[in-house]
Image (cartoon, rainbow, N blue to C red):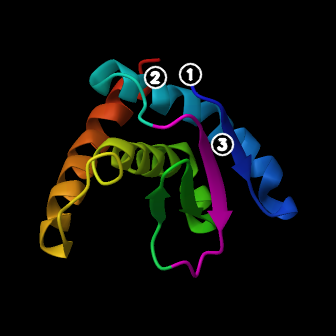
Amino acid sequence: MIPHRIFAPPCLQKSCEEILLPLIPQCLSASYALLGTHPFSRLDVLIVPSNFSSLGMASPHIIFLSQSTLSGGSHLCGTRLCHEIAHSWFGLAIGARDWTEEWLSEGFATHLEDAFWSAAQQV
């Protein structure tokens, strides 16, 4: 299991620890079972304001997750985490040649989101 941390505004830290901290290892374990070793050495989650342009975004070593996902509870948080974790392989480790191929990254991440989340709920 790679090291993982959550960074959130102080007013959201407790809810992030309650909702997200248990989900991260479950989602990572599910991804390892399907794809093998994670391509990066750590995973941090940064909670961003709800006016962020999307529910989530992946970058090497960090996932940006909109605070609006917290209101959806463990299901929405879990599926968003799984989607962004999938981008570690499809979108970050293996990237599109240009924007015309971005649908491949999103397609794989969307498919794997369901597979990871289904497996994560069994952990």
Give the camera-side residue of 100 and 122. Answer: 100
| Mark carried by residue 19 | 3
Q: Does the CB distance between marks 2 and 1 fall below 8 Å?
A: yes
Q: Which residue is mark 1?
A: 1
Q: Which residue is mark 2?
A: 29
Q: Which residues are magenta?
A: 40-52
Q: What's the residue type where badge 2 is placed?
A: Ser
Q: Which x, y percent locates residue 1?
A: 56, 21
Q: Is residue 54 left or right of residue 74?
A: left
Q: Mark 2, residues whose alpha carbon is within 10 Å: few (<14), some, or many (≥20)?
A: many
Give the camera-side residue of 46 and 91. Answer: 91
Q: Residue at x 13, y 66 (%)?
A: 101
Q: Which x, y percent locates residue 11?
A: 85, 63
Q: Residue at x 19, y 71 (%)?
A: 98
Q: Is residue 23 left or right of residue 38?
A: right
Q: Residue at x 51, y 27 (%)?
A: 26
Q: What's the residue type where badge 3 is placed?
A: Ile
Q: Residue at x 42, y 51 (%)?
A: 84
